[in-house]
Structure formats: C-alpha cells, structure tokens
Amino acid sequence: MPRLTLSRNVIVAIVGVLAVTAAIEAWMGRLPLGPDGRFGWLEADIWSSSQSQRVLDPYSFTHVLHGFLFYGLLWLVARKAPVSTRLFAAVALEAAWEILENSPIVIDRYRAVTIAQGYIGDSILNSVSDIFMAAFGFLLAWRLRVGVIVTLFIVSELLMLALIRDNLTLNILMLIAPQESVRAWQMAGR
C-alpha cells in the first residue's frame, strides 16, 4: 500500500481549515471549552451538560464514521486525486458540518426533535476534535479493506445503539424525519 505523504501546502491548508472553523464558531458564540471553562478529555454521559464540550464523547465514534463515508464519497467522485487532496477535502467537509451543526437553526432542530433537548452546541475544542476524528476515520478507510470498514461501521452503530440508544443512523433519521416512537424509546434509556 502506498504511503501517505502530506505536502507542506496540504498541512497548511488543513491547519487553515481548523483555524477558520474555530474562528467562525467563536464568532457564532461557541466557547473554547464549553460553559464551565474546564478542559476535559472525555465525557461519557450523553445526558450530561458537559456532553459535546470535551475532547471525546460517545458521538466521537459517529465522526469516525463520517470519515469512512467521506472516504467512500471522495473515492467515487475524485478517485484519481491524491489521497492527501482527498483527506483535505474530507477535513473541509467535516469542518463545514461542524459549523452547520453549531448554527442556531441546527441546535434548535436537535433540541426540538432529538433526545438532545438540552443541547447547547459543541465547544470549539469538541468541534476540532470531531474534525480530527473524521480525518482518522478517513485514514482508516484508506488503509483497511472495504469489508473491514463495513464491519467496523456496523459494529460501531450497534454498539452505540446498545450503550446509548443513539448512533449516526438514528441521528440522521431524527434530524430529517423525526419519529416520536424512536425518540420515546431513546428517552426511556435515560
């Protein structure tokens, strides 16, 4: 398998995307470390007010899955582009999602139709970490066989479903076409 070589330009571009994302989120009112101003590595409780404020949380797995999906999409539409260019594109796509996810319209949508009733948006730290997780997922997808990636995707979704009654699939479903029965089932796990 070929090695990934990141040119200085690609590294600068990725760092630039991270900086611009952080700046836009700060402009939108996102806090660097969340409302309590404390740094933390992990928040495992999805019902906690610290959810989406630390470096990692259960939803970090969904961002790895974003990376799998971005790899597949970019392989389909830009197969001949260098992997480093596709990695940059995946980082840019995830950054765009993080900005959109932390916009008032999406935060309000999460509160209205998903189990994230008290959701206040991500801290900048969490958003940047989510971008890194998507990049990690992209690199895993680049390195591993399709069957392994599909298996990891399914196992991750089932594990999250069992542990927190939420996953990427339900998150998308509930944002696009909310189902009260699904929401009630999710809330019963609280």
Image (cartoon, helix red, strand yellow):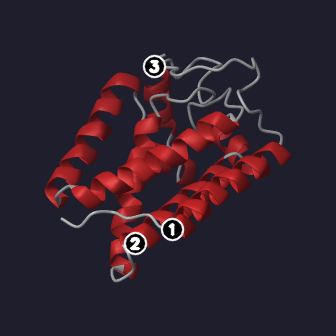
Image quadrant where residue 86 sits: bottom left
Describe the element under mark 3 as helix, strand or loop. helix
Quadrant in which the N terminus appears: bottom left
Residue receiving disc 3: 188
Which mark is drawn over residue 155? Answer: none
Q: Which residue is mark 2?
A: 74
Between discs 3 and 2, the one toward the N terminus: 2
Q: Is residue 49 left or right of residue 56?
A: right
Label 3–label 2 contact, CB within 8 A: no
Q: Which residue is mark 1?
A: 89
Residue 48, image x and y in percent?
Answer: 59, 17
At 72% across and 26% down in the image, what residue appears?
A: 34
The answer to whether residue 122 of the structure is visible from this angle is no
Q: Residue at x 55, y 30 (%)?
A: 55
Amino acid at circle 2: Leu
The residue that appears at 77% across and 22% down in the rendered structure is 35
State if disc 2 and disc 1 touch (CB < 8 Å). Answer: yes
In this orientation, which residue lies closer to the viewer: 155 or 85?
A: 85
Quote the CA–CA distance across marks 1 and 3. Answer: 39 Å
How far apart are the two marked residues, 3 and 2, measured between alpha carbons?
A: 38 Å
Check the image and report above or below for 131 versus 52: below
**Residue at coordinates 40% horizontally, 46% vertically from top-left?**
64
Residue 87 coordinates in the image, percent (x, y):
44, 64
Looking at the picture, does residue 109 appear above or below residue 15? Answer: above
Residue 40 in view: yes
Secondary element under disc 2, as helix, strand or loop, is helix
Residue 116 coordinates in the image, percent (x, y): 60, 31
